[in-house]
Amino acid sequence: MNCEETVIPSAVKEQLWVRQCGRVFDSKCLISWCPNTITAFDCAFHLLTPCSRGGRFSMDNVRVVCTTCAANIGDRYSIAEYDDKFRVRTSHSTWEYVKGWAWSLMEWRSILMFFMSFV
C-alpha cells in the first residue's frame, strides 16, 4: 500500500492484531514504557519506519500501539526512536537519587544562609 492510503481494511487490521497480540481481547501498548492497555477496537496501527523515511504500509512494517503513543509519534520518529527517546533512564538506584536531592538541599541552605548573613 502507498503511504497516501490511510485506510487499512478491517481484515488486515484483524490479521495485524492476531499476529502481534495473539487471540486476546486486550494487550499492552508496544512502547515499552507506556502503561496503556489497548483493545482490538481501541488501538492505532503505526509504521515502524515512517513514510517520511521511505516506509511503506506492509504487514512487516506496521505495529499496534495505543492511540496516545501514535499521536505523539506522528511522522517524526520511528517506533524504536520514540521508545528510546522518551524512556526514563534508571541507571542510578533510588538511594543515589535521594542522596543527590539531600545534597542539593544542603547546598541551597548554605547559599541561603550566606545571603541572609548580609541582612
Image (spheres, rainbow, N blue to C red):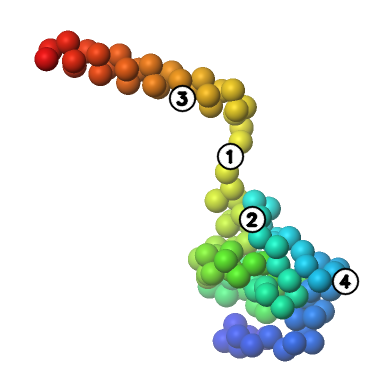
Earlier along the polypeptide chain: callout 2 or callout 3? 2
Instruction: Quickly name the residue at label 3.
Output: 101
Looking at marks 1 and 2 on the same chain, the residue that comes earlier in the sequence is marked by 2
- The reply to whether callout 1 and callout 2 are in contact (CB within 8 Å) is no
96 is higher (above) or lower (below) than 39: above
> Which dot marks residue 44?
none
The amino acid marked with disc number 4 is Arg
From the viewer's perspective, is residue 53 above or below residue 97?
below
Task: State how far apart marks 1 and 2 are (Cα).
Answer: 14 Å
Q: Residues within 10 Å of mark 1 (few under 14, many from 20)?
A: few
Residue 83 is situated, as x and y percent measured from the top left of the image, at: 61, 54
The Cα atoms of the two marked residues, 2 and 3, are separated by: 27 Å
Q: CA distance from mark 4 to mark 1?
A: 33 Å
Tell me the tag on residue 23.
4
Q: Nearer the viewer, residue 41 or 3?
A: 41
On screen, residue 73 above or below 44: above
**Pick the front one: 19 or 50:** 19
* Residue labelled with disc 1: 89
Residue type beneath disc 3: Trp
Residue kind at label 2, given as amino acid type? Cys
Q: Earlier in the sequence, mark 4 or mark 1?
A: 4
Instruction: Say if residue 53 shows up in the picture.
Output: no
